[in-house]
Image (cartoon, coloured by chain):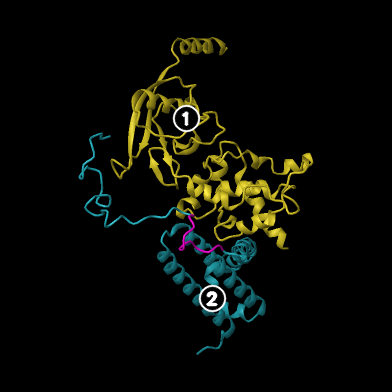
Chain colours: A yellow, B cyan
Amino acid sequence: MATPVLDKVEAESAASPYITVTFRVRRFNPEVSGEATWEDFQLEIDPKERVLDGLHKIKWDLDGTLTFRRSCAHGICGSDAMRINGKNRLACKTLIKDINPEKPITVEPIKGLTVLKDLVVDMEPFFQAYRDVMPFLITKDTNEPTRERLQTAEDRERFDDTTKCILCAACTSSCPVFWNDGQYFGPAAIVNAHRFIFDSRDEAGEQRLEILNDRDGVWRCRTTFNCTDACPRGIEVTKAIAEVKKALITRRF
Amino acid sequence: MSTTEKTADVSGIGPVEGADVYSVDHPAPLIEAPRKRTKKTPKSTRGNFEMAAWLFMRLSGVVLVVLVIGHLLIQLVLDGGVSKIGFAFVAGRWASPFWQVWDLLMLWLAMLHGANGLRTVINDYAERANTRLWLKGLLYTATVFTILLGTLVIFTFDPNIR
């Protein structure tokens, strides 16, 4: 029944896949003004393209001063996390057709970090929190890799989810507790601590737990699930934080 | 967006960024990035207070569900509802140590639960250290006052007053 209609739509879209989309971009240039402003751009774009392609079209064809980060453009490097239509996403993994191109698409820098220019923020506080949880393998007996450190498939599975993190800061900058004073470690740092705390080969779990037992550690988490919603890698961030809380409680009693 | 060359009074530059406020001799105050290690950075806490507070919220919450719903049922629903409450009703209940302990437990748990909840709200929403200090000072004063006054009343209640 529906087949003829589908054919017709497909034929029409094959004729011209392009639609006109408005990009509403948050612009900020500290050398011109202390205020950030919205600027609209009209684009001819295939709805099957990504938001990042739209930003490229703006930067390459319309306004070369638009500044944003992107490296691999395929959802692995974690450079282009931004707030698209009020939600933290990777611009390179968000298709135009999935975010209602009828209305203007708003693109803002991620929140809670200092904006340097347009969509570029200072990631230093984010990486400071990351460094604080010691995101590297620590062993007591020897640091010299004389042989492979073996691990069962079950032990590897224990922390598999948190190995997927690409440090894009989408989770941390979606966290309302982080927005306040930026002192909270943030979901990303806890996820990366989780990756080593639950690794059977690592022996500094106790140290990392002690770091996250801090006033600004896991206990500031309010379980709002913003981080889990924001993660472009689908990591169950809030669950990982809860597992760290549980480990902190059970190691005492 | 304005693309004109930079002059001292480009519109849009607030007085804070204006050259007349800050100069080489009067540099603008440096704002440290969050989490940067400076002398003013709060010391990392090495106690288990936050964990104890987190656990207390969960455990006291479970107990309070029983205590408060029981309290509301007795006071407002069962046996004639709210109209029965008077001095005699309260005096009658507090004659039994069971209800004294019930009310005392409810007072302490509810006050500490609420105070700890507000403490986290203040920590999350107050931005300046001074605001936090004053709000928490007010909160702790009110909490201690209410708990002490309530405990005093429960233990020294005299049904034959006047």
Can residue B99 be seen in this snapshot?
yes
What's the residue at 57%, 33% (across, down)?
Answer: A76
Q: Compared with residue A118, is residue B108 higher up or lower down, i.e. above or below?
A: below
Magenta region, residue range: B35-44
Task: Give me the chain letter of mark 1.
Answer: A
B55 or A178, which lies in front? A178
- Look at the image and tell me whether residue A223 can be seen: no
Camera-nearest residue between A163 and B51: A163
Q: Is residue A227 magenta?
A: no
Hey, what amino acid is under mark 2?
Ile
Q: Where is B141 relative to B33, above or below?
A: below
Quarter of the figure with residue B61: bottom right
Depicted B80 relative to depicted A49: above or below: below
Distance Cα–Cα, label 2 vs label 1: 53 Å
Q: What type is the residue that disc 1 sits on?
A: Ile
- Residue beneath the point at 61% across and 59% down: A213
Left or right of A86 in this view: A232? right
Q: Are marks 2 and 1 on the same chain?
A: no
| Picture coordinates of residue B58, whole percent (x, y) | 63, 60
Horizontally, residue B127 falls left or right of residue A196, namely left
Q: Which residue is mark 2?
A: B147
Magenta-span inclusion, residue B36: yes
Dividing the picture into quarters, in which one does residue B131 lie? Answer: bottom left
Left or right, A142 with reference to A233:
right
Say left or right for B68 vs A79. Answer: right
Q: Is the N terminus of chain B in the top left, top right, bottom left or bottom right quadrant?
A: top left
The residue carrying mark 1 is: A99
